[in-house]
């Protein structure tokens, strides 16, 4: 009897402890930059970190799941016309803004009209296909049906609608605050902003949102720590922390630490970008000569192949824009670089610890070429773009496993890559590919566009890297998106 009583007490104690352990604690994500001083209009997401954050704050018409399938969100269904030049979207009921008001079809209509007329999106140019000189008559509403009539085919159209840049905002949005920070507090996504300072953003789970469950993390802190070493120190001294490795350097460091790890497929590409206005790189032959030597040096360096893969292409092996390896390798056969030449290389602070550039510098020195590596704060980006006092920049970008046209649009528009600058032939090719309906011709156009950037030596890909998340928390990541390693907070659930 005493033994049975003891076992019964032990059961209740153990069960009680398990329930106590199930209590949600705030989960802190450490980012190198939360861009507090940026314009926070969700309609433009030029930073990877801002894109990750806004994807949780604002609900789009449709969403992409972990298997790259489009799923209903605010839209319950959608249907293209046979010529792909119009789409009818059914708006569903039961979705709410964070202030508690239900999202109506009219709200959706006004929200889409605002974004299309703004023309500020960084991953899309749907505006050109729907609106002409401010007249967005291609967008219409009848009952619960939104119609978009396009003046041309837009490849990657559904991906655009799944982007937070097209997320649905209230009609009062942007009426009172030019920085859009006040407007962050009542959007439509699975998480709501509760506080936003220079150092951190505090979010709460919207319990009624369809993406959330009882196990979804309830309180989230997104904390800015610019130094990666300091972020690791913070991780070691605090519990319920998630560190994000977006570049190769941070991934290598995180892989050595204790904790639960989640690693995506190759989803980013690190590369050198030339300043084509630099006297040392202002012609194709000059860029070809240097790129050939860097490519040779790259082959000598060692990297962790679990976290990165050497490459000479922008896109990964499973991508429509991927080229034949033989075609690409033939581009880097020149070695006519003047001895004792020095090239100034900018590395922005969030990638300051990259081992790749120093390793390449060491190998290039053996070939008579010196790299002058300078670490620059991201806050000085505007000055860098204005002065253009550099020869190369080392950067990374996504490789868009969904549809490479999205990545091309982004790279052509990005102020640093600026592939549209002095590049009329490639711009023309991009515009042609955007509207190519035939699948085989579309793939051919993507590959030709990719090759044109490599042949003009506008970009030198170095490695494909993987996103890695490391946590010492009570939460697990239920589904890491295979392609882009995106920060889907609703996928973080209590163990």
Image: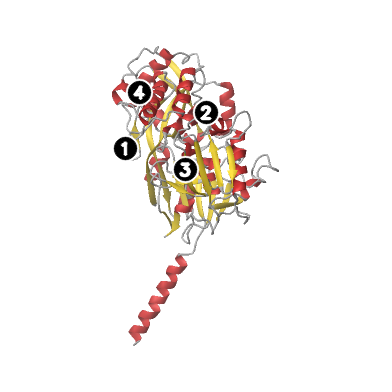
Q: Are marks 2 and 1 in contact (CB under 8 Å)?
A: no
- Kind of element beneath mark 4: helix
Residue 413 image label: 2
Q: Residue at x 53, y 30 (%)?
A: 151
Q: Nearer the viewer, mark 2 or mark 4?
A: 2
Going from the N terminus, do you reach mark 2 or mark 3 first? 3
Q: Nearer the viewer, mark 2 or mark 1?
A: 2
At label 3, counting other C-alpha atoms closer than 10 Å, the crowd grade (few under 14, some 14-19, many 20 or more) is few
> Left or right: 351 with respect to 95?
left
Going from the N terminus, do you reach mark 4 or mark 3 first? 3
Q: Nearer the viewer, mark 4 or mark 3?
A: 3
Q: Nearer the viewer, mark 1 or mark 3?
A: 3
Check the picture and name the quadrant holding the C terminus.
bottom left
Give the residue number, with chain letter if any, for mark 4.
295
Distance (Cα) linking label 2 and label 4:
26 Å
- Kind of element beneath mark 2: helix
Distance (Cα) linking label 2 and label 3:
29 Å
Going from the N terminus, do you reach mark 1 or mark 3 first? 3
Give the residue number, with chain letter if any, for mark 1.
305
Distance (Cα) linking label 4 and label 1:
18 Å
Q: Nearer the viewer, mark 2 or mark 3?
A: 3
Residue 396 appears in the figure: no
Give the residue number, with chain letter if any, for mark 3.
79
Residue 311 percent coordinates (x, y): 34, 29
At label 1, counting other C-alpha atoms closer than 10 Å, the crowd grade (few under 14, some 14-19, many 20 or more) is few
């Amino acid at each position: 009897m005493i033994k049975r009583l003891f076992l019964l007490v032990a059961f209740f104690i153990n069960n009680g402890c398990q329930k106590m352990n199930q209590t949600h604690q705030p989960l802190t994500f450490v980012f190198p930059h939360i861009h507090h001083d940026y314009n926070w209009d969700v309609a433009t997401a030029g930073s990877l970190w801002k894109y990750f954050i806004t994807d949780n704050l604002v609900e789009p018409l449709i969403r992409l799941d972990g298997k790259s399938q489009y799923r209903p969100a605010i839209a319950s269904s959608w249907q293209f016309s046979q010529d792909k030049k119009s789409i009818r979207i059914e708006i569903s009921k039961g979705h709410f803004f964070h202030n508690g008001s239900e999202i109506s079809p009219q709200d959706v209509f006004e929200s889409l009209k605002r974004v299309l007329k703004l023309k500020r999106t960084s991953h899309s140019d749907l505006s050109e296909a729907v609106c002409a000189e401010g007249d967005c008559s291609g967008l219409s509403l009848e009952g619960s049906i939104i119609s978009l009539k396009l003046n041309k085919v837009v490849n990657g159209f559904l991906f655009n609608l799944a982007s937070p840049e097209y997320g649905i905002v209230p009609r009062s949005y942007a009426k009172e605050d030019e920085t859009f920070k006040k407007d962050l507090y009542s959007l439509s996504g699975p998480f709501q902003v509760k506080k936003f300072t220079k150092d951190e953003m505090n979010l709460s789970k919207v319990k009624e949102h369809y993406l959330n469950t009882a196990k979804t993390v309830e309180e989230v802190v997104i904390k800015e720590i610019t130094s990666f070493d300091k972020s690791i120190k913070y991780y070691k001294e605090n519990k319920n922390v998630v560190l994000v490795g977006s570049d190769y350097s941070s991934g290598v460091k995180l892989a050595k630490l204790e904790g639960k790890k989640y690693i995506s497929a190759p989803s980013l590409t690190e590369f050198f970008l030339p300043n084509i206005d630099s006297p040392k790189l202002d012609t194709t032959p000059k860029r070809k000569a240097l790129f050939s030597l860097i490519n040779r040096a790259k082959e000598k360096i060692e990297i962790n192949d679990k976290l990165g893969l050497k490459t000479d292409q922008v896109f990964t092996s499973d991508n429509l824009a991927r080229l034949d390896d033989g075609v690409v390798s033939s581009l880097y056969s020149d070695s006519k670089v003047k001895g004792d030449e020095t090239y100034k290389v900018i590395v922005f602070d969030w990638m300051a610890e990259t081992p790749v550039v120093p390793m390449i510098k060491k190998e290039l020195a053996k070939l008579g070429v010196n790299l002058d590596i300078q670490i620059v704060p991201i806050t000085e980006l505007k000055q860098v773009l204005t002065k253009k006092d550099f020869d190369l920049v080392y950067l990374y970008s996504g490789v868009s496993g969904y549809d490479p046209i999205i990545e091309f649009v982004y790279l052509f528009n990005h102020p640093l890559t600026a592939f549209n600058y002095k590049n009329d032939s490639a711009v023309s090719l991009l515009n042609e590919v955007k509207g190519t309906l035939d699948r085989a011709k579309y793939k051919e156009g993507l590959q030709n566009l990719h090759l044109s950037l490599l042949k003009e030596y506008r970009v030198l890909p170095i490695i494909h890297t993987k996103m890695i998340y490391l946590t010492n928390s009570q939460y697990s990541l239920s589904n890491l998106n295979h392609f882009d390693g995106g920060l889907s907070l609703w996928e973080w659930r209590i163990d």
